[in-house]
Image: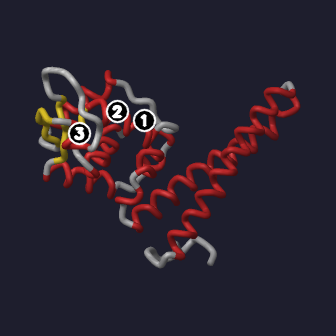
Amino acid sequence: MLELAVLGLLSESPLHGYELRQRLKATLGAFRAFSYGSLYPTLRRMRASGWIAEHEGDAEVVAGAPALTGRRGKVVYELTAEGKERLAELLAEAGPSAWEDESFGVHFAFFSQTAPEVRVRILEGRRSRLEERREGARSSLKRASSRMDRYTLQLQEHGLESVEREVRWLTELIETERSAGTTPPHPADPQ
């Protein structure tokens, strides 16, 4: 998912490493915590794959950030034509990997660059996954509630409420996408 996030941000503008890390945290903060330990190996791998290019440059000129002092210019990363193609491939993925907990937030952060029909498939997949989780939590809570202390019970109820809230939110997003006229209604969904 870091690959998608990096490509998505670099599609907006070239960035140096520190600024890229800051933008990752700002864009995906609630969903992911990124470290230099994972970012720079990913950048090296992406450069080796030909998806990004790097050069020394002035951050002020390249990304609108304040000029950095020091003898050596900062390394600036930018998307290549191959990187744009790879980003398009990643944005078009709408299978289970796009709606799981680990990756949904990253995909959602770049929905503005994602085709409407792919957005709906990802939202529907996420909602379906959470509906399964909700039903499992309900039945587990029903079976075990008499054996739980009140704090554990409240924690379980809070988790269930969170899942229910996300299901409602996803349903609203799907309805909004469909009402925009960009995707046909899903045959299993009531109109």
What amino acid does circle 2 point to? Arg
**Which SS class for mark 1?**
helix
| Residue 10, placed above or below residue 54 | below
* Snapshot colouring: secondary structure
Q: Which residue is mark 3?
A: 60
Q: Position of residue 174 (x, y in %)?
A: 55, 65
Q: Which residue is mark 2?
A: 21
Count residues near mark 3 (Cα–Cα under 10 Å), then give few for <14, some for 14-19, many for 20+.
few
Residue drawn 22% across the image and 24% down it: 69
Please tell me which of labels 3 and 2 falls first in the chain.
Answer: 2
For the N terminus, the image quarter is top left
Count residues near mark 2 (Cα–Cα under 10 Å), then give few for <14, some for 14-19, many for 20+.
some
Q: Position of residue 119 (x, y in %)?
A: 44, 61
Q: CA distance from mark 1 to mark 3?
A: 20 Å
What amino acid does circle 1 point to? Lys
Q: Which residue is mark 1?
A: 25
Residue drawn 59% across the image and 71% down it: 189
What amino acid does circle 3 point to? Glu
Q: Is residue 116 left or right of residue 82?
A: right
Q: In which image quadrant can residue 63 be found?
A: top left
Residue drawn 37% across the image and 39% down it: 23
Name the front one of labels 1 and 3: 3
In front of the other: 117 or 84 = 84
Q: Position of residue 13 (x, y in %)?
A: 25, 48
Q: Is residue 60 left or right of residue 38?
A: left
Q: In which image quadrant can residue 173 be found?
A: bottom right
